[in-house]
Image (tube, helix red, strand yellow):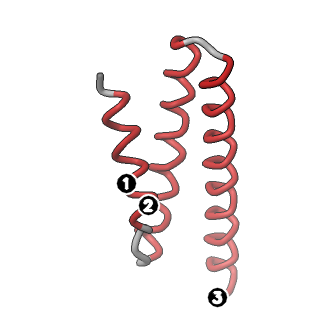
Amino acid sequence: MHRPQRDDRAQLAACRAEVALARSLLQEARTSGTRQEIAPLRERLVAALEEFASLVERSGAPLPQHLHAELQMYRRLGSH
């Protein structure tokens, strides 16, 4: 019975790592990249945040407000 909890924790940790990597790559591109390089990295971050949010929701826990706000901001930026 403990196996699903361990799997969930492992998935959350992997998602957290992907979010951190996506944020880092986007920040790096903002300082040295072009607009064309930034858009796909922003999309990668949105996808990572969405996956993390989905896992949190499935666990029954609330999504922290700062993550919800960050996800909404990047979704809006990507729609322009």
Look at the picture and state if 72 lies above or below 29. Answer: below
Residue located 68% across and 63% down the image: 13
Position in image of residue 18 (x %, y %): 65, 47
Look at label 1 and name its amino acid. Answer: Ala
Residue under label 2 = 66
- Name the mark on residue 1: 3
Q: Looking at this view, is 75 or 54 the one in front?
A: 75
Q: Earlier in the sequence, mark 1 or mark 3?
A: 3
Position in image of residue 1 (x %, y %): 64, 88
Mark in front: 3 vs 2: 2
Q: CA distance from mark 3 to mark 2?
A: 32 Å
- Answer few, some or many: residues within 10 Å of disc 3's Cα (few below 14, many 20 plus, some between 14 and 19): few
Residue located 64% across and 57% down the image: 16
Position in image of residue 60 (x %, y %): 41, 78
Mark in front: 1 vs 3: 1
Label 3 element class: loop
6 left or right of 70 in image: right
Look at the picture and state if 65 lies above or below 21. Answer: below
Look at the picture and state if 72 lies above or below 58. Answer: above
Q: CA distance from mark 2 to mark 1?
A: 5 Å
Residue under label 1 = 69
